């Protein structure tokens, strides 16, 4: 039986791969709207360092799931999936094409496949893990996670306190790893037929050059002043552990925050920021290689092929 679900495009790729410009161009051409699938763009005030598209860059195209939380507020993958599904349903109801654009693998997974059931948060277990972190440090807990669940430890950065805590919490509550839980896919059918496209440069060197160029452009655009403004917000200035907040742990922001705390000079901040962005891209590419039904293309040299794939999907002969 033919699949008569409405169409959607999932435009995935590592950071600095050119997803935003492509999403806007295709939305303009095919009557679409963009749903951001990016865990940094959900936060208000994270603009320059998160490469949030400006109003001009959005080209008059509605963008959903941008600026939906303040940087001190939590926002889970489950909340994202609920909000993004509502946005997709709304876009489709108006006869438009949803273009899901971003590089946050967990968000894509939650939206397209649903989240596996696993133990809910437990305040006592979390408090116990936090107490251990104060005594031993998050790096030690990350190493412990590596012995319990190597797959999760590989995906989670050693400084990502929130995700380390969640992975250990799930293990301690259930005796099963979070990776094991996630392999149990729930019954879930996304309401659209999706073309998955991965845009990525052909070589690591090209991607690294783009990352460095974009980071320098962010610095020239006033990235540090943006972080100074964030630090001055009362809710962040009074927060006991701002570096534990997911928003401030976003790539570049953590390094900028530590630099402004005096932890290292401007040159080292630049080096650390670029290195952290490269590491993010590496993790994103590892996830993307697991998307076996995705089609890959270089957004520059392979642009014509990508556009043929989209045209044949949206406007089949």
Image: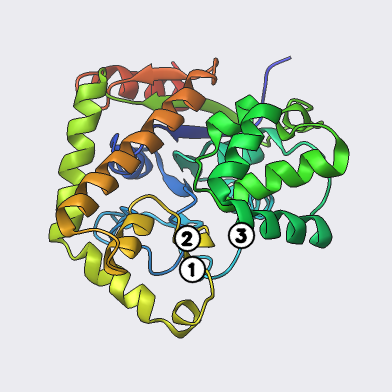
Circle number at residue 134 = 3
- Image: 168 above or below 294: below
Mark 1 or 3, nearer chain start: 3
Q: Which residue lies under the disc numbered 2?
A: 247
At a point 76% along the width and 47% down the height, the residue shown is 169
In the image: residue 68, left or right of residue 188: left
**Which quadrant of the structure image shows residue 260?**
bottom left
Mark 2 or 1, nearer chain start: 1
**Which quadrant of the structure image shows residue 317?**
top left
Most foreground residue, 41 or 6: 41
Task: Give the structural element (helix, strand or loop) at label 3.
Answer: helix
- Image: 286 above or below 58: above
Question: Which of the two discs, 3 and 2, sits closer to the camera?
Answer: 3
Task: Give the structural element (helix, strand or loop) at label 2.
Answer: loop
In the image: residue 17, left or right of residue 183: left
Contact? badges 3 and 2 (CB < 8 Å): no
Task: Give the structural element (helix, strand or loop) at label 1.
Answer: helix
Q: Which residue lies under the disc numbered 1?
A: 242
Contact? badges 2 and 1 (CB < 8 Å): no
Mark 2 → mark 1, Cα distance in angstroms = 9 Å
């Amino acid at each position: 039986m033919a699949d008569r679900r409405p169409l959607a495009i999932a435009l995935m790729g590592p950071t600095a791969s050119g997803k935003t410009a492509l999403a806007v161009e295709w939305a303009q051409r095919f009557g679409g709207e963009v749903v951001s699938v990016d865990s940094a763009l959900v936060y208000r005030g994270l603009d320059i360092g998160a490469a949030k598209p400006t109003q001009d860059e959005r080209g008059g195209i509605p963008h959903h799931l941008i600026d939906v939380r303040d940087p001190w507020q939590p926002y889970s993958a489950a909340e994202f999936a609920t909000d993004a599904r509502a946005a997709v349903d709304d876009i489709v109801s108006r006869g438009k094409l949803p273009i899901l654009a971003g590089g946050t693998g967990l968000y894509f997974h939650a939206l397209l496949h649903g989240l596996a059931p696993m133990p809910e948060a437990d305040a006592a277990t979390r408090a116990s893990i936090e107490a251990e972190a104060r005594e031993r440090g998050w790096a030690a807990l990350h190493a412990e996670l590596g012995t319990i669940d190597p797959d999760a430890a590989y995906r989670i950065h050693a400084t990502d306190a929130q995700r380390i805590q969640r992975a250990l919490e799930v293990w301690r509550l259930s005796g099963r790893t979070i990776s094991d839980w996630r392999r149990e896919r729930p019954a879930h059918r996304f309401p659209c037929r999706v073309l998955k496209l991965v845009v990525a440069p052909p070589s690591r060197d090209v991607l690294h050059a783009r990352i460095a160029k974009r980071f320098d452009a962010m610095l020239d655009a006033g990235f540090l002043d943006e972080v100074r403004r964030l630090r001055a917000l009362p809710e962040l200035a009074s927060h006991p552990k701002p570096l534990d907040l997911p928003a401030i742990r976003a790539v570049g922001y953590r390094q900028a925050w530590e630099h402004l705390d005096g932890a290292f000079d401007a040159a080292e901040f630049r080096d650390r920021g670029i290195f952290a962005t490269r590491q993010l891209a590496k993790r994103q590419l590892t996830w993307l290689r697991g998307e076996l039904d995705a089609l890959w293309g270089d957004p520059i040299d392979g642009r014509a092929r990508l556009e043929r794939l989209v045209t044949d999907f949206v406007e089949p002969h």
